[in-house]
Amino acid sequence: MWLRYLCIIPGLPPRGDLSTADVVLVQAFGRNQYPDSELDHITDLHVAYGKQDAVTIAKLREQGFDPGQPNRDLALACQQLVDTYGIAAIVQWEVTVAFDPAWYAAHRNRIVSLWPTAEYFSTRLVQEHSLRVMQEHGWTKPIELAHSWQIVRAFLIVRKLFGHEPMVSSETIRCFDSKSVQWWTRSKVKWLAYECLARVHHVLYRWV
């Protein structure tokens, strides 16, 4: 695990008995609209619609919001896990928008969407929010689902916060999107430049 972290080796082998899981945690990877400085628009929209996820998602789709190909791939992988194991999912809002609309309509009672806050929605902050949601629902056995170039860092953050390892599925998401508003998710080269600094930061601050 630490060799993968320090050498930035993508992906993780499957871990744990997924049939015992009760929730899947899904980490978004970029988006093709709304840079981080404009996420207050998304927050305001969610509040304007009474914090009703389904209504907000429908409005974003109506406006033509593009979550980006990595998030569409993550959404599909999440759908498969929810269907296969009959579990819930805690996902970042970009991934919720990327779900197949008919599938989301049929499963929305199992989906908890994480919406942006005033603070930068870092990987660690997303996992902190996920932990709170898990505690509220009594879920204790998560599957971590993230982009293959991000999952090692996400896995270690979850392990540090939760006090135990999450499970990992065999799904592989490796694509980048050149149209992403987050420059570091546009290509593998740019991601590596960002990820090197992020991993050093996480070690120094004991986030992993």
Image (cartoon, rainbow, N blue to C red):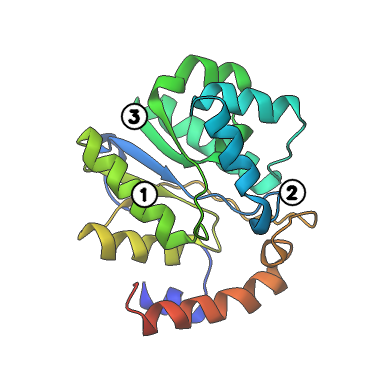
Q: Is 170 situated above or below 36?
A: above
Residue on which disc 1 sits: 129
Q: Residues within 10 Å of mark 2 (few under 14, many from 20)?
A: some
Callout in the foreground (1, 2): 1
For this view, does 3 lie left or right of residue 60?
left
* 117 shown above or below 60: below
**For the residue marked with disc 1, what is the amino acid?**
His
On screen, residue 173 above or below 152? above
User: Which sits earlier in the primary sequence, circle 3 or circle 1?
Assistant: 3
Residue plotted at (29% across, 49% down): 131
The dot on residue 141 is none
Q: Kindly indicate whether the residue at mark 1 contacts the one at mark 3 (C-beta within 8 angstroms).
A: no
Residue at image mark 3: 87
Spatial CA distance of label 1 from label 2 is: 23 Å
- The amino acid beneath tag 2 is Asn
Three-letter code, disc 3:
Ile
- Residue located 46% across and 20% down the image: 107
Question: Viewed as shown, does residue 191 lie left or right of 77?
Answer: right
Q: Position of residue 186 (x, y in %)?
A: 73, 62
Is residue 5 visible to the viewer in this orientation of the structure? yes
Q: Position of residue 134 (x, y in %)?
A: 27, 41
